[in-house]
Image: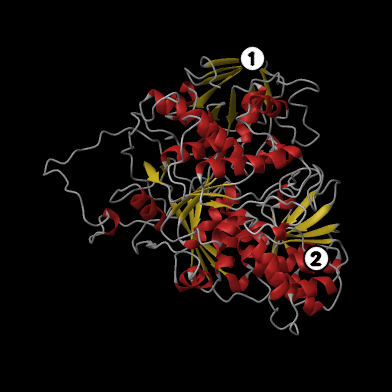
Amino acid sequence: MAMSINSSFTSAKGEGVESFLGNSLLSRTCPSSSSLCNNVRMKSVPKIVAVTAPPRPQERAPASTGSVKQAMTMTEKILARASDKGCLSPGENVWVNTDILMTHDVCGPGTIGIFKREFGADAKVWDREKVVIIPDHYIFTADERANRNVDILREFAHEQNIKYFYDIKDLSDFKVNPDYKGVCHVALAQEGHCRPGEVLFGTDSHTCTAGAFGQFATGIGNTDAGFILGTGKLLIKVPPTMRFVLDGEMPSFLHAKDLILHIIGEITVAGATYKAMEFTGSVVENMTMEDRMTLCNMVVEAGGKNGVIAADSVTFNYLEGKTQKSFEPVYTDGSARFNAEYKFNVSELEPVVAKPHSPDNRGVARECKDVKIDRVYIGSCTGGKTEDFVAAAKLLHASGQKVKVPTFLVPATQKVWVDLYTILVPGADGKTCAKIFEEAGCETPASPSCAACLGGPKDTYARMNEPQVCVSTTNRNFPGRMGHKESQVYLASPYTAAASALTGFVTDPRKFM
Amino acid sequence: MAPSGKVFHGECFVVQDNIDTDQIIPAEHLTLVPSKPDEYEKLGSLALCGLPSNYPRFVCEGEMKTRYPIIIAGSNFGCGSSREHAPVSLGASGVKAVVAESYARIFFRNSVATGELYPVESEFSLSKEFETGNIVTLDLESNVLINHSQNKQYTLKPLGDAGPVIDAGGLFAFARKTGMISSASA
């Protein structure tokens, strides 16, 4: 077995529930569907007030003072600092300060509606520099409501003088829109909005991607986001942390996507519900930022609240020149307690897919070689980053062959699109990704956006409007995810997607590597 | 829209495990903005239209509301996206409560924050025992679910602190009621 589980069932401390509102908002019994979940019943315990001298204001933030009162994980430390508390335990409900709130065209209008309804038509957002508005979901479509939603974002951004609004006006050519970025989670990283130690909320489930930068990042709904717009704060329950230790030698044909699909297949789609997933180990330390983003991106597919990876020189190098703001990373204490610990030796792993219709329906790619497919899709916040395309291009070039099925390429952002035409793929005779894709017969790289990852309006690029079978580098494959209810989606790494495009069947990339 | 009273009665609609947000409200309908009243109603008419074809229709052809005020579900109900359109479409269609074995956390949180429906937990999965169309009574005062059609009664897990928030009408109403934020007219 390539994996061993060490489940240490720690009973969550923190039964002293924060009673800010006189009741603990959202405090509840933990869902018991996962066998590894702590079954904690929340009770209101009266807090014991110290009888010594009242606390004096501290010159340094409590979380950075000398003695560690209690060992904490990275997630607990970030939330402690964001809520001005010395220490926190899983299960506690705390009000945290928000460093960044992100929204996009699908949830932004609803969030804005709630903000105005609750705080007043003339209300101002708590901080015009901490709201990042990124249209990305339904952009290149004739759908009038979709287009109207981008207009709503623009109107709000102007009215509130929002500093970061990545607008698009001319839908016929994304390149003539200098501010437009594309997929929000990749844009947040590329534009330097992800910083170690910070708290980032976004009205999108894959906001957890940013945890790759050693911050607390999670998805929320319109109502919570509307609340943050007005107050800058949100009530959060501190999650216990599950630790995933990845060691061994990463084989050339294996991708970070294989690792996270493997993990989700192991713990199921509810295996990390209400928990933080912390990734560590030599394999993670050797990963690029984009690989780390791939890991954290799909944390939500296991039900996870957030994913997190310790910031290191790889992180700092990536951030160089991207952000002007200073940041202070935090690190998990050596004696911190975890809800569960999984160890993987990646040397023993094989490329995998998630078969229809669930991200935890794990299958070994080579065992699916008889599954005939109709198309391949390479894109999304999960698998549409520059390195994802470089990986696919490398395999295609090494094969020297052409694809046998329509192969759709959707770069996540404008920057990624530019990279496809400029970056020289290593070991490919000085060719760019775009050149390799063209020679292999793939479709021309499309306008950057979320596109068909989640179906969208019927005219969305690469949407499946018929019951077809697709191998995709995206993140979810529930029924109807990419369009037609009876269509089938196999989630895979860029290597597996490229290999499958070359054969017209689900294919293990080792066939070409 | 806060449900009135804590006892609900009517036909139940049964779904199985891992009903994700794309099945509750397919992504192509996310252009509808929940804070606009007419689009809110439209979302209600589309609730659960993403379910596979072997399920009966949740909202009948030409109708805007559902005949099923209570949904019985298996585990991990509401998994997938953070889109608030999911609990909103259910609430807008007339759902008062979901009784599931377990929930995905963002869906649970959104249900509480919007006050659209009560996300109740059963002691074990009822999705294989109940049948769509069974007449049920859900009593959130005493945490009991009665299946009249099968003459059976089940204990439910208490809502805990999520209850008062939904009773008040969601996060903002609750925050205002307890003085956390001032009223909108201020």
**On screen, residue B134 above or below B77:** above
Please state which of residues A344 and A441 is positioned toward the viewer in this rendering.
Answer: A441
Which residue carries the number 2 mark?
A500
Determine the residue positioned at 72% across, 24% down: B132
Q: Residues within 10 Å of mark 1 (few under 14, many from 20)?
A: some
Q: Quadrant of the N terminus of chain A?
A: bottom right
Tell me which chain the residue with mark 1 is part of.
B
**On screen, residue B8 above or below A241:** above
Which three-letter amino acid code belongs to the residue tagged 1?
His
Labels in figure, total? 2
1 vs 2, front mark = 2
Where's residue B149, x and y in %? 68, 15
Same chain under badges 1 and 2? The reply is no
Q: Where, by quadrant of the figure, is residue B44 drawn?
A: top right
SS for tag 2?
helix
Q: Which mark is residue A295?
A: none
Which residue carries the number 1 mark?
B148
Please state which of residues B137 and A376 is positioned toward the viewer in this rendering.
Answer: A376
**On screen, residue A197 above or below A304:** below
Where's residue A378, x and y in %? 74, 61
Which three-letter amino acid code belongs to the residue tagged 2?
Ser
Residue A388 appears in the picture as rendered: yes
Determine the residue positioned at 38% across, 50% down: A79
Q: Where, by quadrant of the figure, is residue A365 drawn?
A: bottom right
On the rendered structure, is A199 left or right of A364? Answer: left
SS for tag 1?
loop
